[in-house]
Amino acid sequence: MTFLTYILLCIFIVSVCSYVSAFSGALSFWGQKLADIASEDDIFPSGDGLGYQRLLSPNKINKLKLLSIVGNLAALILGVIYFGWYVGLAAIPVILTVSTILGLTLYPKSSNSFYRNQIIADLIRQQARFVKAHDLKTAFVIYKIIQMFNRFDAYGMRLPS
């Protein structure tokens, strides 16, 4: 492995980590906005394990979170094996710092409609999967959450009732 290949791998890991960080911030933002309208106890049947964050988190974000963890471990291990312990150990804080800076500067704010639209589209896909699986209770909960999103404009400002 050349040093250039290692740097390109680290750049890929940085981009994945920064996107996951930015999207996770948006999930927290929109989850809090929904919780301000109605508590989870009002929306979700008790004891079924559903919650705002579980339903709002798209599957692709969960997979990208796993990829970022594996990528950080790969950067550490490959850095140690090919370039010495100091390169592998230095890669982790550099990746985390740069990905945080990129997440704060490059990607839209948490309240941006970019994330809102992606979350709603994923909720619609999840609802269709639950209807197809005959889990109408969960599909109805997702329907109620989608309706709650309609109480906000594209940037998280609550619309008048």
Image: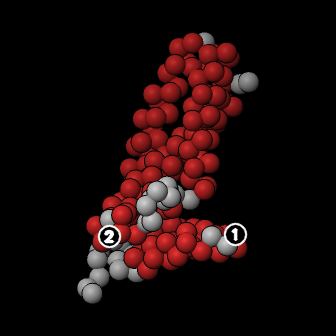
Name the residue rendered at 49%, 72% in the picture.
141
Residue 115 appears in the rendering: no
Does 157 sit above or below residue 16? Answer: below
Q: Amino acid at mark 2?
A: Ala
- In the image, taking residue 46 as reference, residue 125 lies left or right, namely right
Q: Quick one: which residue is furthest to the right in this view?
A: 1
Name the residue rendered at 60%, 12% in the picture.
84
- Label 2, secondary structure: give it: loop
Quadrant for the N terminus, please: top right
- Residue 93: give x, y in percent of width and height: 45, 28
Q: Which numbered tag is attached to residue 153? A: none
Name the residue rendered at 63%, 21% in the picture.
77
Which residue, given by chain and number where applicable, does mark 2 sit on? 38
Does 91 sit above or below residue 107? Answer: above
Nearer-the-camera pick, 104 or 74: 74
Which residue, given by chain and number where applicable, does mark 1 sit on? 133
Name the residue rendered at 49%, 21% in the picture.
90
- Residue 73: give x, y in percent of width and height: 60, 28
